[in-house]
Amino acid sequence: MNRRILMLFLITAIFSGSSLQAGVTKDYGEKGGRDQAETDIRKAMDAYARQYANLRPIEERFPDDYQLVQLCLLLDTSNSMDGLILQAKSQLWKIVNELSGVHKDGKDIRLEVALYEYGNDNLSLSSGYIRQVTPFTENLDLLSEALFSLETNGGSEYCGHVIGSSLNRLQWNRSDEGLKMIFIAGNEPFDQGSVNFRVSCGWAAERDIFVNTIYCGDYQTGVNTLWKTGATIGKGNYFAIDSDRLTRVIETPYDDDLIMLNSRMNRTYVPYGKRGKESLARQSEQDANASGLSQSIYAGRAATKGSKLYKASDWDLVDALEDTLVTVDELEKEYLPEELKKMTTQELSSYVQKKKKERKAVKQQINDISRKRDHYIRNKEMEGDEASLGSSIVKSLRDQAETKNFSFK
């Protein structure tokens, strides 16, 4: 960490009653500066953890995977942010499809996404008006469901608090070679609340987690209200977007074919286990949610489902057997579809193999058409594309992935 960043931290803490407030800027100098900065940041975060339950570090098993990409979305759900939430719903599949072309050392990546909401008066004051909607998950249907469940109300937006909570309450990758990113979007001053954003963003930087800030409003206003400062301390990018502007949707000649193939692929899923039936219904519901936004967005979701980033092995028997998570012999048949319950082990194995073969063929068709669709969309975007939540995330992905030797096809 260079001297310029160290001088920004404002880490010296002053205790006053039960609240922790930022002190004055401290120049640690070159020698021993990094160690002292880390120590002060840790002390400040420890003090916040004693004050707020959602800032206490979790005691869980953490991944250690150099191929893992983790994205944490922190979305302001106060009254004025309906447009932001609509952009998140609309551009989820575009973002994931961008990541489907990312590799590490020629190998496919793993993707986990977490979602927080903040600034909503329906949430408790003691939590800092913050809620973890989903922890890190590979289940993109669950993430889509979570986005569509968000409702705006209120409120008071505490950026430092929600960043700190996401840092301490999620299972972040331990590998220095993985890509770890926070995206926080909102429209109120970045320094609101009792948790100093300089401490939270400094803690993220020390843990090699990029903090990207997206101000919903005028660029200079975001600078004046410290959104750019947060990104600088967190080693991320700063953007300003018009969250109320309708997202540009590019219809393509390939959308109808992808939607048709999506229907065919849906028929290859075989639910198993206690969550199987529920998860199959969720998949269908998220298809409907995407379709309700536009046919182009629905086609984008279909493209995602044909990629290796769409995971269903926790509820789909085809994927589960492929990943050797279960065997046919150990299945609890009571949770299988009615038409499969009376099958012998051999019959069930043959049935799943048939579905696997069908899915492989459909996925290949989806991938072939998706490449043509991507090319078409990129050409259209060259004609002009406005700044949005999705474009901001994609730009940061490309910039920051390169620093960890991830490559885009």
Image (cartoon, grey):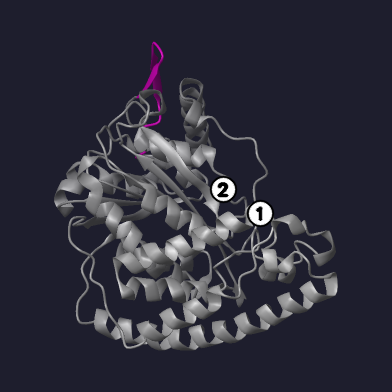
Q: Earlier in the sequence, mark 1 or mark 2?
A: 1
What amino acid is at disc 2? Trp
Number of marks in the image?
Answer: 2
Q: Is residue 12 shown in magenta?
A: yes
Q: Position of residue 311 (x, y in %)?
A: 58, 65
Residue located at (29% from left, 59% from top)? 87
Residue hosting label 2: 172
In screen coordinates, is 244 left or right of 14? left
Residue in front for this viewpoint, 72 or 291: 291
Residue hosting label 1: 64
Q: Position of residue 234 (x, y in %)?
A: 39, 47
Q: Does the rendering let one see residue 200? A: no
**Stretch in magenta:** 8-21
What secondary structure is marked by label 2?
Answer: loop
Rate crowding at label 2 as few (under 14), some (14 to 19) or many (20 or more) other CA atoms within 10 Å: many
Rate crowding at label 1 as few (under 14), some (14 to 19) or many (20 or more) other CA atoms within 10 Å: some
Q: Does the rendering let one see residue 358? A: yes
Q: Position of residue 337 (x, y in %)?
A: 66, 63
